[in-house]
């Protein structure tokens, strides 16, 4: 029997999709019993069992809205979560943010070693593209190429990696709000946008446009909330080191705007994101619920 997940209550839907993406990752990641054992174990250590799977949830919500084929949505959600996992592994390394804790566990280079963490990131990234480029995935080759283009651009120097380099260079510098926004649109926003665009691949131009507006607002809102949590939450709840931004002398929405104005800014972005979904009416309810989920998250 095929279950229509679009009719589920939101918390049930989130749990079902989170469990489902764990299962798919389990199938896609090479078995820990296959050589090279250390690399395969470390890839699983970093990509599985942990994480809210927000990017996969956004991808699935967009796919439900745009009636994207399930196998395409699965490949897209998996690829985006693999890219995200790779970025966290590299971000935690001593040459970048140098963090010992991730998803409540020792970060990959702490559990293994620096060389393994570097290779885990590389291998997770290539596995993402292997997943999205499977020859049998799409009937329409141009659509599959379009998807590969979306993910490549979002991950590279005009997306996440570009944002990361601005982030590393900005330590101790007094960025203004526009510079901070540019950095986060690339570092955090690009992959969130890719998740939504991949989920809605094949949608008409006006639908894709509305989803892109929602994505841009929620990508930034996600980061503003992250900056607020870094100040207000503790390490156990976050599963990563709290207060890291201040410790590293990094510009954040909280340091630039102040805590109250940062909260207000997050609410404005949330409001704009919901407004962008107006053309869909009630059909975009899942994306509305996900926007609320991102705003209310505690880790
Ligand atoms: C190494 C190329 C490269 C890029 C790294 C995304 C990123 C760039 C670094 C992550 C550092 C960080 C904490 C960014 C803030 C926003 C963010 C991406 C938080 C982590 O994402 P969540 O909360 O994590 O979705 P989970 O663990 O739930 O998947």
Image: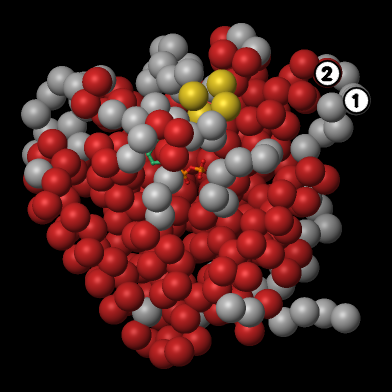
The answer to whether residue 160 shows anywhere in this view is no
Residue located at (76% from left, 51% from top): 24
Tag 2–tag 1 contact (CB < 8 Å):
yes
Judging from the image, the colouring scheme is secondary structure
* Percent position of residue 167, x then y: 29, 29
The residue positioned farthest toward the right in the image shown: 33
Residue located at (37% from left, 79% from top): 277
Decide which of 197, 227 is in the foreground and name it.
227
Q: Quadrant of residue 292?
A: bottom left
Decide which of 278, 132 is in the foreground and name it.
278
User: Cα distance, mark 2 to mark 1?
Assistant: 6 Å
The quadrant of the rendered image in which ligand 1 is seen is: top left
| Residue neighbourhood size for the residue with mark 2, other residues' Cα within 10 Å, grouped as few (<14), some (14–19), many (≥20) | few
- The residue that mark 2 highlights is 37
- The residue that mark 1 highlights is 33
Residue located at (73% from left, 42% from top): 130
User: Which label sits on residue 134?
Assistant: none
* Percent position of residue 225, x then y: 30, 50
Q: Is residue 8 above or below residue 153?
A: below
């Amino acid at each position: 029997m095929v279950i229509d997940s679009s009719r589920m209550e939101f918390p049930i839907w989130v749990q079902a999709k989170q469990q489902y993406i764990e299962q798919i990752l389990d199938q896609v990641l090479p078995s820990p019993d296959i050589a090279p054992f250390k690399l395969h174990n470390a890839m699983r250590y970093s990509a599985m069992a942990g994480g809210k799977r927000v990017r996969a949830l956004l991808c699935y919500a967009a796919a439900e809205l745009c009636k994207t084929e399930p196998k395409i949505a699965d490949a897209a959600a998996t690829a985006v979560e693999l890219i995200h996992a790779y970025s966290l592994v590299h971000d935690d390394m001593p040459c970048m943010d140098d963090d010992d804790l991730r998803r409540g566990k020792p970060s990959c280079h702490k559990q293994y070693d620096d060389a393994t963490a570097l290779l885990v990131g590389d291998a997770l990234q290539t596995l993402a593209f292997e997943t999205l480029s499977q020859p049998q995935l799409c009937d329409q080759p141009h659509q599959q190429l379009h998807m590969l283009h979306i993910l490549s651009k979002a991950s590279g120097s005009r997306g996440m990696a570009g944002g990361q380099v601005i982030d590393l260079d900005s330590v101790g510098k007094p960025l203004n709000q526009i510079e901070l926004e540019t950095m986060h649109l690339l570092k955090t926003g690009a992959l969130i946008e890719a998740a939504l665009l991949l989920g809605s691949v094949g949608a008409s131009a006006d639908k894709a446009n509305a989803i892109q507006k929602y994505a841009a607002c929620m990508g930034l809102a996600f980061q503003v909330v992250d900056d607020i949590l870094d100040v207000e939450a503790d390490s156990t709840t976050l599963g990563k080191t709290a207060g890291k931004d201040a410790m590293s002398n990094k510009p954040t929405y909280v340091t630039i705007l102040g805590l109250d104005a940062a909260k207000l800014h997050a609410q404005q972005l949330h409001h704009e994101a919901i407004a962008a979904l107006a053309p869909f009416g009630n059909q975009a309810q899942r994306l509305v619920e996900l926007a609320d989920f991102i705003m209310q998250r505690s880790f």
